[in-house]
Amino acid sequence: MSNKISVGVLGATGAVGQRFIQLLENHPWFEITALAASERSVGRRYGEICHWLLPTPMPAAVRDMVVQESAPGLPCRVIFASLPGDIAGPTEKAFAEAGYIVCSNASAHRMEEDVPLLVPEVNPDHSALIDVQRRRRGWKGLIATSANCSTTAMVLPLKALQDAFGLRRVFVVTMQAVSGAGYPGVPSLDILGNVIPYIGSEEEKIERESRKMLGTLHGESIQAAPFVVSAQCNRVPVRDGHTECLSVEFEHKPDDVEAVIAALENFRVPLQVAGLPSTPSQPVIVRREPDRPQPARDSDLEKGMASVVGRVRPCPLFDYKFVVLGHNTVRGAAGGSIHNAELLVAQGYITN
Amino acid sequence: MSNKISVGVLGATGAVGQRFIQLLENHPWFEITALAASERSVGRRYGEICHWLLPTPMPAAVRDMVVQESAPGLPCRVIFASLPGDIAGPTEKAFAEAGYIVCSNASAHRMEEDVPLLVPEVNPDHSALIDVQRRRRGWKGLIATSANCSTTAMVLPLKALQDAFGLRRVFVVTMQAVSGAGYPGVPSLDILGNVIPYIGSEEEKIERESRKMLGTLHGESIQAAPFVVSAQCNRVPVRDGHTECLSVEFEHKPDDVEAVIAALENFRVPLQVAGLPSTPSQPVIVRREPDRPQPARDSDLEKGMASVVGRVRPCPLFDYKFVVLGHNTVRGAAGGSIHNAELLVAQGYITN
Amino acid sequence: MSNKISVGVLGATGAVGQRFIQLLENHPWFEITALAASERSVGRRYGEICHWLLPTPMPAAVRDMVVQESAPGLPCRVIFASLPGDIAGPTEKAFAEAGYIVCSNASAHRMEEDVPLLVPEVNPDHSALIDVQRRRRGWKGLIATSANCSTTAMVLPLKALQDAFGLRRVFVVTMQAVSGAGYPGVPSLDILGNVIPYIGSEEEKIERESRKMLGTLHGESIQAAPFVVSAQCNRVPVRDGHTECLSVEFEHKPDDVEAVIAALENFRVPLQVAGLPSTPSQPVIVRREPDRPQPARDSDLEKGMASVVGRVRPCPLFDYKFVVLGHNTVRGAAGGSIHNAELLVAQGYITN
Amino acid sequence: MSNKISVGVLGATGAVGQRFIQLLENHPWFEITALAASERSVGRRYGEICHWLLPTPMPAAVRDMVVQESAPGLPCRVIFASLPGDIAGPTEKAFAEAGYIVCSNASAHRMEEDVPLLVPEVNPDHSALIDVQRRRRGWKGLIATSANCSTTAMVLPLKALQDAFGLRRVFVVTMQAVSGAGYPGVPSLDILGNVIPYIGSEEEKIERESRKMLGTLHGESIQAAPFVVSAQCNRVPVRDGHTECLSVEFEHKPDDVEAVIAALENFRVPLQVAGLPSTPSQPVIVRREPDRPQPARDSDLEKGMASVVGRVRPCPLFDYKFVVLGHNTVRGAAGGSIHNAELLVAQGYITN
C-alpha cells in the first residue's frame, strides 16, 4: 500500500478537475483515492462518464474509479475543489468542518479574513491564518484557497517588484484563454475570430485578490498591500494561457529596464518553498525577444508553473510596462492548488 | 462621360488597396481611373493578377483595368496611396510635386509639420496646413494623411471627451486584427490560437499621432494636445476590427458614467463634415450591453465608419475606463483616406 | 395596415430564429407578427431577453415584441419553425392541425411520406404532397420542410448534374461551420484549432434527404432517386458556410470538365421559381480559381442563397470531383424555409 | 567524445528544420554536428537568426552553432534535408554524390525508380533500392526519402488493411494543418475562420506515393500496388495534425467493423523495426469514441509517431469508412526522416 497522502477531487469531470487528475498522476506525495462530481455522474465509472478534454490520455488509475457524491465521507485526507460558484462555498465548508484539508480553487472563501489566499512563492507565511481559522471556527480541517487565474499569473512578478521597488499603482489589461471559463464554457460562436471584452467579476477579483496576496500578516489578519490596481479583462480565441499587459508605478522608480529585469530574474523563493515538487526552478522567466511571451509558445515553460514576462520597457505615464503570461489551468488553477497543498505538507498542516 | 473626380489607387493589389477599390465602387463623387502596383504586376489586367481577399466580388469596373507603374503620369486627379513604409515617402512626394492630390494611408509624412493628419469629424480645420505645405514646398498638388488604424478608432471618442472634459492621461491596450498587417502579413503559425504582444512601431504611432490629431492649429503648425498616452499593442486572431481598452484621466472629472456616455453620444460633427458621403450618421456609438463591442459583431456598424464604445465604468486609478472598437481597414485605412478626400472636396482643395 | 402575410417565428431567440428575423426584415411578402420561444422568455420583450448574435443590428420592429408561447393561438398565418429535435415534431403538428402553414427547418417530419422536403429550384412540384397530406390528415394547415443544411448546399449542383447526366454514386465529405450547431452549440474548447470528425445523425440525413429531394413524384408519394450517397461529416472552426468535397459517378459520363461546368452554369429554374423574392439570380455559381470556394470569402454570394462550386476536375475513381459551398444558416436554414414559403405563396398554398 | 552518428540538418531554420532539431535533442543514436540554411543565415549563430516556432525551448546544443552553407563539406555523416522544392533535388543529389547519407523530406526524388520511399513499419524492405541506386549512380552516399505528410498518416492503417484484406479503391479527403505549409506558409488572412480547398500538388502526391509505398519490390524496382486512390485536400485552421476521411473498397470484404478494427489493432511490425528508437509501441491506434480522433487532442499520442484511426463504420458505396489522424511535422516530416535513418542504421546502410 502507498504511503502517499490520499486526495479527492471535487468537480472531477470539469475542465479544472481533469487538470487536477492529469497533474496528480505520478505525484510524489499525493494519490487520488476519491473522485466526486455532480449527481448525474454519481455511481458511474469515471472513464465512462467523463468527456476527457486534455491532449494527454486519461490516467489509467482513475478510469475505473466510481464517481462519488461531493459530501464528507469521501475516503481521503485532502480535498482539491473546483466547484461552480454557487455550491463551492457551502460544500467546501462542510468538508472543512468534517476535518478535511480543503485546497480550493473557487472564489467563495478567498476574501474571508481567516482564510489564506496562497501562492507558495509569494506569501507562504499567510498560511498562519489557518490557526486563526481553526480556533475561530472550531475546525479540525481547514480551507486554503488559490487565487483567480489571471491574478496568480501577475502576482509572481509583482511580488519580485514589490520586494525590490515597492508598488504604488498597477494597470492591467488581460487577454484570457477560453479554458479559463471551464467546459462547455465559452460558445464557439462567441469567440471564433472574436474578442469578448468582458469576463464577469474578473476585474474585481484581480483588483482585490492581488492586494490580499501581496499584503502583510499582522497578528490575526492580512493587511492588504497599499497599492491600487485597475483591471480590464478580455476573452480571446486562445486555448490555454492568459496574457496580461501591465503598467506599474513604483514606490522607488527603478533606474532602468535592466534593473526591472534583474529584480524579476533574481526573484528567489524561501528554501521551504523551493523544495516543493511543483515549485518551478524559475518562477519568473524573463524573455528578451521583442514579441514574447506568447500563449501558444510559452505557456508550458516550467510545466506551466512559471510566469513569463516580456517586453519590459519604460511607460510614458507610469514607470515601466511589461507583458505577463501564465498558464491559467495549471499555475492559475489545478497546479496552484496542488502547489498550495504541498506547502501545507511542508508546513505541517497536512500529515499522513 | 462621368462627371466624377478621377482617382487612382497605389498598392492596388494589397489588402488596403483592395479595400479602396471595394469602397470606391459606386462612390458618388469619385471614380477609379487608374490602378498601380509593384513592378511584376505592371502591364497586366487587374483581374488576372490580383489575389482578391474580400468577401464581396471584385468590382467589374476594375477587372479589366491594366495595372500601371506607381509614378506620376497616372490618368487621375486624386491618388489613394497604401504603400509599404520604405517606398511610400518618396512616391507620395513625387505625386504631390507633380500636382496630384495625395490621400495617404502610410506613416511616412504623417508627422511632418506641414502635413495634415486628418479625421474629418475630429480636426477638419487641420487641412489648413495644406496651404502652408504648398507655399513652403511649391507644390500644386498636396499630401494629406490619415492616421494609423488603432489611433483612428480611439480619436473619435477621445475628441468627444476632450471637448467635454479635457484629457490629461490615456492608457490604451489594443487587440488588433490580422488584416491590419496587410497580405500576406501575419503567418498563420504565429497567430492561430495565439496572441502576439508586439506590433512594430505601433505603440509610438498611437502615442504621437493621437496628440497631433487632437492638437490645435496655431498659425502655421499644430500644437500637440497636452495629454500623455501610453499604448501597448497586441495582435489577436481576429480578421477585422481593432479592440482597445482605454483608461482616461480628464481635466475635469465627469460626474458619473452617464455624463461620459452623454458626451460620447452627443458628439456632433461640423455641418460641412456631416454632409460627406462617408460620414457615419453616428460617428461614436455607445453600447450598453456588458459585453460589447466585439470585433466579429460590431465592426461593420455604420459600414465600418463608426467607433463603437462600450463598458464605460469608473477606473480605480484614472477616472473612467471603456472599450473602443473600430474597423481597421475601413475607418482605419481605406475608408478614412476616402473620407479625407471627401473633406478636401468640400473644402475646395480638390476640384474636378 | 400592411397587406403582407403575417408570419411567426418559433425558436425566435436561437441562432436560426435570429437569422429568420434578420432575413424577414423588409421582406416584400411577409411580416413578422409573432415571436415564440421557450418558457422562460414568454411574456418578456424580445429585445430584452435575446442574446443577439448577428453582425447586423436587431431589427427595430421586433425589439419590443412580447415573446409568446409556442402553441396555436399565435396571431399569424405562417409559422417559421426552428425548434430543437425533441419538441419540433409535436409542436409543428399542433400548428398544422390548427390551420397554420408550417415551414419547418427541423428534421422531425422531413422523411414522412406526405410531407414535402423542398428546395424551390430543385423540386417545386413536390409541394403536391401537401394535398395528400391535407386529405390524409384532415388538416387545414400544412407542414412543408426544408432539408438539412449540408444536404441543401449540395442538392442544387446535384440537381443540375442529375438533369444533364444522371447520378449513380456520390461521395461527400463535409467541413461544417459552427453556426450549424446553434447557440450555445459547439464549446470553444472543442473546436478552437481543432476538427471534430463527427456530427450526430448528419451523415444519415445527407444520405437520405438528398435522394428524397432529387426523387420523383409518383402519384401520392416521392420515389427516391436511384443513386447512392456516402457522407462523412466534420465540424471545423469556421463561423458560417459548409464546405463539401464531392466525387460523383454519373449515368452518362460527361465528356470533360467543361461539360460539367456548363451543366452547372446553365442550370435554370422554372419561371415560377425565378420570380420568388429569395431566388438567387444564379443558384449555382462556378468558380474557376484553383482555390475556391472558401467559406470566409464566398458564403455571402447571392446573399447567401447560392451554392458555389469550384475545383471541378476528373476523379481517378468516379467521374468528376468538385467542391461545394453553401451558407448553412441562410440557404441551409432560415433562408431556405422563407424561400419555401414564397414558393407556397406562388403556388397558392398560402393566401393572405 | 560522443559515439553517436553525426548528423546535419539542411533548412535548419524552417518549420520542419526546427522539428528535426527538437526531435534530435537527446536522440540515442544521432547527434547534430552541422546546421545549414539559406545564404543570409550562413556564418551566424543559430540562436541569433532562427525565429524559433515550437512551444519547447530551443535546445541549448544548437544555440551557438554557426549556420553553414547547404553544400557538401558539412562535418557529418547523415543529412536530414527539408528544403524547398526547387533546390531540394540538386542539393540532395550533391550530398549523396559526395558520400553523405541523405534522408530527405522533400518530394524531388521520391518517385525516382531507384530511390526508396520509406516508412519503416510499412516497407522496410524497399531500402534494397539503395543498392540499385548506388550501383547505377556510382554513389558512396545515398538518398532515402520519406513521403508527403498526408500520405504517411494514411499508409500505416492502409498497410494493416492491405495485409488483411487487400486494397482495391481508396477515397480520401484531407483536412490539413497549417504547419504543413512551413513558415511563413499560409497567411492568417487566408485561413482564420476559413477552409482552403486546395493544396498545390498534394492530391497527386497522395495518389502516387501511397501506391509506391504499398507496392512490392520486384528485382530492381517497386511495382506499385494495384489499388486506385482519389484524394481531395483542404487546409483548415489547425496548428498540427492532418485529419483524413477515408472510404475503402477491399479485395476481400471484411466481415464487419470489428474485423477492420482487429486488423488495425493487430498490426505488427518486423522485429528489426520494433527496436528502433522512434518506432511507436503502437503504430496504429484505434479510438472507439464517436468523435475521435481530433487533431488538437490526439496528434501527440505516441509522441506524434502513431496514426490514430476512428469512426470505423460501413460505407454505403465502398466497404468501410474511417478517419485517420497523423502528426504532420513529426511522423509526416522530421520524425519520419529520423525514423528512416534509424532503419538504415539497423540495416547497416549507415555506420559510424
Image (cartoon, coloured by chain):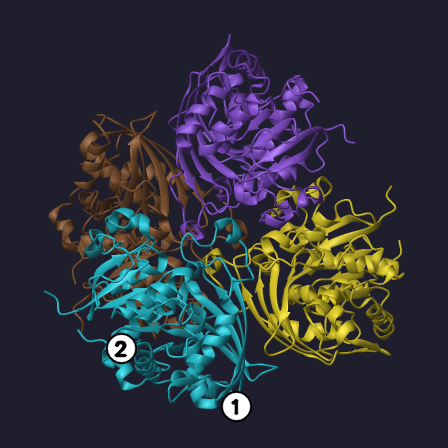
Chain colours: A purple, B brown, C cyan, D yellow
Vertical relation: B304 (above or below) A157: below
Q: Residue furthest left?
A: C1
Question: Residue A166 in the image: x percent, y percent?
Answer: 48, 17
Which residue is under mark 1?
A: C251
Q: Quadrant of residue C329?
A: bottom left
Left/right placement of residue D71 relative to residue B55 reads right
Image point (39%, 44%), residue name = A196
Q: Nearer the viewer, mark 1 or mark 2?
A: 2
The tag earlier along the polypeptide, 1 or 2, is 1
Image point (47%, 33%), residue name = A87
Circle 1 residues within 10 Å: few <14, some 14–19, many ≥20: some
Question: Residue D147 in the image: x percent, y percent?
Answer: 70, 66
Q: Looking at this view, is C172 or D100 the one in front?
A: C172
Vertical relation: A52 (above or below) D337: above
Q: Quadrant of residue C22?
A: bottom left
How many numbered marks have been drawn onto this rendered protein structure? 2
Give the chain letter at badge 2.
Answer: C
Circle 2 residues within 10 Å: few <14, some 14–19, many ≥20: many
Question: Residue B246 in the image: x percent, y percent?
Answer: 34, 35
Question: Residue C87 in the image: x percent, y percent?
Answer: 39, 60
Q: Looking at this view, is B272 or D337 the one in front?
A: D337
- Under mark 2, the amino acid is Leu
Disc 1 element: loop
Which residue is under mark 2?
A: C344
Q: Is residue A255 visible?
A: no
